[in-house]
Amino acid sequence: MGWYDADIDRVIITEEELRGKTAELAKQVAADYASVDGLLLVCVLKGAVMFMADFSRELGKIGGPPVELEFMAVSSYGQGTTSSGVVRILKDLDRDIAGKHVIVVEDIVDSGLTLSWLLKYLESRSAKSVDVVALFRKPEAIKVPVPVKYVGFDIPTEFVVGYGLDYSERYREVPYVGILKPEVYQR
Ligand code: XMP
Ligand code: MG
């Protein structure tokens, strides 16, 4: 039992489901990219960090193409739970991505604003191809159409935490994904 269990109202995705889905997504990507000589995974910090670790390791285990790991940090949200609509680069790519097959590894697509901006940015840096794998998507919250080739779970438009996702920088270490009790937001 973690300290956080008492703050969770309900679990929506279990550890086992996360593991199973990650393996499934890696299998699809490995099959689709079987003929390329390398893949550059771009993790969007911080929320996607657990997914990046598990997804890339799974690709390795099943014999996917060699991967390189890159990390970007952008901010579209403040401390709270609603989108500001403003995207700012907090940490840029360390290397040139020109001519590379890029996969953006995202935690969650909510309004789609962050991702839509990010895709334009990566394309402007002359990637050979850009696809997206997102562990979660909130289909009813979408504001701008954005092509997400690989989606783990479609979830309701509710704020979720765990497996990298935070509320005010907390709950990222929760091994499952869940919804917080309303009183947590009143603290
Ligand atoms: P947009 O609206 O631009 O937002 O698609 C994407 C980013 O917003 C964060 N986000 C969440 N973070 N629980 C979180 O902890 C959530 O339910 C949630 N919904 C959106 C997240 O950083 C995502 O990349
Ligand atoms: Mg956050």
Image (spheres, rainbow, N blue to C red):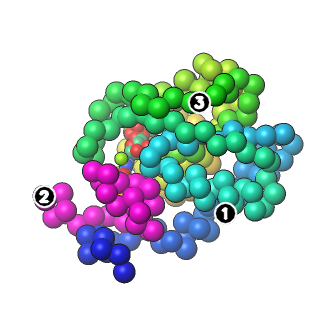
Q: Residues within 10 Å of mark 3 (few under 14, many from 20)?
A: few
Q: Residues within 10 Å of mark 2 (few under 14, many from 20)?
A: few
Q: Position of residue 6 (x, y in %)?
A: 26, 75
Of mark 2 and mark 3, the one earlier in the sequence is 3
Residue farthest front in this picture: 94
Residue placed under numbered mark 3 in the picture: 94
The secondary structure that most of the magenta stretch takes on is loop
As helix, strand or loop, the secondary structure at mark 2 comes to: helix
Asked whether the residues under the numbered discs 2 and 3 touch, taking CB atoms below 8 Å apart as contact, a structural biologist would say no
Task: Tell me which amino acid carries mark 2.
Answer: Gln
Residue placed under numbered mark 2 in the picture: 186
Task: Tell me which amino acid carries mark 3.
Answer: Asp
Determine whether 56 is above or below 24 in the image.
Answer: above
Asked whether the residues under the numbered discs 1 and 2 touch, taking CB atoms below 8 Å apart as contact, a structural biologist would say no
- The stretch in magenta equals 162-187
Q: Quadrant of the C terminus?
A: bottom left
Residue drawn at the location 44% of the way across and 68% of the way down: 176
Whole-Å distance between the Cαs marked 1 and 2?
Answer: 37 Å
User: In the displayed structure, does residue 184 sit left or right of residue 127?
Assistant: left
Examine the structure image and report whether residue 165 is included in the region drawn in magenta.
yes
User: In the displayed structure, does residue 59 sit left or right of residue 54?
Assistant: right
Residue placed under numbered mark 1 in the picture: 23
* Badge nearest the viewer, 1 or 3: 3
Residue drawn at the location 60% of the way across and 63% of the way down: 21
Q: Position of residue 185 (x, y in %)?
A: 18, 57
Determine whether 59 is above or below 72 in the image.
Answer: below
User: In the displayed structure, does residue 3 sit left or right of residue 59?
Assistant: left
Please say whether residue 143 is visible from this viewpoint: no
- State which quadrant residue 162 falls in: bottom left
As helix, strand or loop, the secondary structure at mark 1 comes to: helix
Examine the structure image and report whether residue 67 is included in the region drawn in magenta.
no
